[in-house]
Image (spheres, helix red, strand yellow):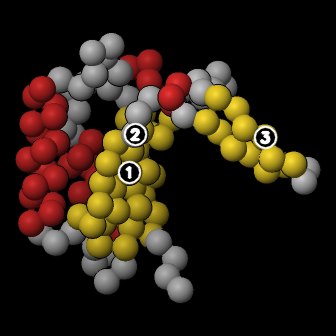
Amino acid sequence: MPRYLSLVRVDESTVPADGPSPELMQRMGDLIEEITKAGVMLDTAGLVPQAQGKRVRWEGGKVTVVDGPFTESREVVGGYALMQCKDLDEAVEWTQRFLRTHEEYWTVTCEVREIAEG
């Protein structure tokens, strides 16, 4: 069965200063439990804010390392989900359910892509 990666992109300007609400975390926890029991979720995690990261780039034969935050980025990768689904439609369906756990003031985009095997 194919595997899919859902890259969760978050507009950090819409994230509350004190982080996700307890209600959001409960809804997300319930969904993760359901998707895991269904045998779909292989791995998932959120990421710390980009200000705590580094960007490593290869260009022109040289490597550069830049400390976060990255001023040109408004929407950043905030997490991921690795799923095993029968097809892309099923992966998108689970991803839509994940997005609906968020309150209206969040701006979250997920990019769902099949993992190239082999």
State the residue at coordinates (32%, 26%). Answer: 106
The amino acid on which the numbered mark 3 sits, given as a three-letter code, is Thr
Question: Between disc 3 and disc 1, whose residue precedes?
Answer: 3
- Residue 2 is left or right of residue 41, and the answer is right
CA gap, disc 3 to disc 1? 25 Å
CA gap, disc 2 to disc 3? 22 Å
Residue topped by disc 2: 47
Q: Is residue 10 visible?
A: yes
State the residue at coordinates (28%, 73%). Answer: 85
Which circle, 1 or 2, is nearer the viewer? 2
Residue topped by disc 3: 64
Query: Residue 114: image x %, image y %?
Result: 45, 70
Which circle, 3 or 1, is nearer the viewer? 3
Residue placed farthest to the right in the image? 60
Question: From what the image shows, is residue 17 above or below residue 63?
Answer: above
The amino acid on which the numbered mark 1 sits, given as a three-letter code, is Tyr
